[in-house]
Image (cartoon, rainbow, N blue to C red):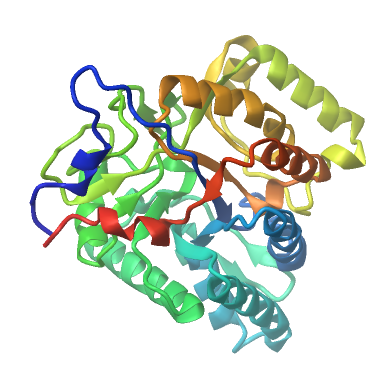
Amino acid sequence: MGSTPSVLDSEKPTANEKPPADNRMLLSLDYELFFGANPGTVEKCLIEPTDRLVAVLERYGMKLSLFVDAGFLLKLREATAEWPRLQPQWDLVRSQLGSLSREGHDIQLHIHPHWEDSFFDGDGWVVKTERYRLHDFSVQQMRSIVRRYKSILEEVSGRPVFAYRAGGWCIQPFAEIQQALAENDVWLDSTVFDKGVSEDPVRWFDFSRLPAKPLWRFSSDPVFEDVSGCFVEVPISSFPLSPLFYWKMALRKKLSSRQFTPFGDGAAMQANAGYYLSRLTKTVPSPVSIDGIKAEVLGKAYSRHRKNMPSAIFNVMGHPKSLTPYSLTSLNSFLEGHPELSAVTFQDLIYLRPAA
C-alpha cells in the first residue's frame, strides 16, 4: 500500500464551494458478548437482537455492518471439541453471520484480545480482562491475533475483511499495532469519534484533535491526517450528551421498564469511578449510538451532523447486546422520517483503498 493521488481528494470542496450533502448512513454495530463476570449468552446477546434489528432495517432497504468480536468466535469453535454442548451455539453464530453476509450485510474485524486468556470451564465463560488491549501483547502475538481473527471472519462471511474497530476504542498508540494490521491487509479504521477522550488507564484514548473532515488518510495515529498514509479513517459520528441525559438514563434503568431493558442477558465490565462521575456532572462527547435510550437522540444527532459535516457519512454505532425495544422503536421512527437516507456498508467503501 503506497501513495498516489487519493480518491479522498474528491471529498474535498474547492475554495468557497459548499460541501455537497451526503445522504449515506452507515450502521456499524459491535457484535460481542459482555466482558464482566456474567458475559451473557449467544442467543440473547447476539442472535436474537441482531435478528430483531435486521427485521427493522429490511423495511427500509438498509444494510448492517457488524464488527464481529472474532476472538470469541475462535474460542467458541475451539471449545466445541471439549464441550460438545457448545456446538449449537457455534452453529447459530456461523449460520447468522454467513446468512447476513450473503444478504449483503457486512462482516468486519473487531478485536477484544482478552479472549486469548479466557476460556470455557464447563459451567460458563471465564473472562480474563487483565490483557484488555491489543497493545498488551508482543509484536509477534499481535500479528498472530490479527491474522487468526481476520481469517475466521473471512471463513464465516465468505467476503474480504479489511475494516477494523478497536475494542473499547483502544486504538492508541496506533504505531504499536500498525504493522500487525498492515501486513494483514486491514487498511480502513472506524474507531474514533470527535472529541472523544477516556482517561481510564485500562481503556485510554484521546480523540480530541480529529481533522474537520468527513474521512482522511493516516499513518501512525488516526487522529492526525497524512495524505500519503496507508490507512483510511471513517470516523463514528459524534454528539454531546448532557448530565441530564445520563441522569434520565440511570432513572429509566432503575425503573426497569421492559421498553428500556436490554435484550442481552449479561453484565457490563465496570469502568473506573471517573467515567461515571464525568457523565453525571458534565456534557461529554459520545458516539452516536442506537444502544438503549441513546437511540432517542438520533434525530438531533443527524441534524447536528448535517449542519457541521454535511459531506460525511452518518456513521451510527451500537451493540446487539445493548439494544432494547425502545432502541428499535426509535430507529424505526428515525428511518421512517428520513427517507432520503441510503444504506452503505464498508464493502461499498472499498474504492477508498489507497493504491499499492
Q: Quadrant of residue 47?
A: bottom right
Residue nearest the observer in this picture, 193 or 102 = 102
How many labels, in total?
0
The answer to whether residue 187 of the structure is visible from this angle is no
View extreme (top): residue: 281
Residue 119 at x, y percent in the picture: 57, 69
Judge from the rendering whether residue 64 lies leftward or rightward of residue 327; answer left or right.
left
Q: Quadrant of the C terminus?
A: bottom left
The answer to which image quadrant residue 249 occupies is top right
Q: Is residue 355 visible?
A: yes
Residue at image coords 19%, 57%:
179
93 in relation to 129, above or below? below
Q: In terms of depth relative to the viewer, which is nearer, 347 or 252?
A: 347
Q: Is residue 45 left or right of residue 164?
A: right
Q: For residue 346, which quarter of the picture?
A: bottom left
Horizontally, is 215 left or right of 295 in the view?
left
Above or below residue 159? Residue 262 is above
Q: For the N terminus, which image quadrant?
A: bottom left
Name the spot of residue 307 as percent of width and height, x first: 47, 20
In depth, the one of 331 and 164 nearer the eye is 331
Q: Residue at x 26, y 52 (%)?
A: 177
- What is the x, y in percent for residue 293? 74, 32
The location of residue 214, given as percent across then percent down, is: 34, 34
State whether residue 298 is above or below residue 141: above
Could you say which is closer to the camera, residue 115 or residue 292? 292
Residue sitting at x 56%, y 23%: 303
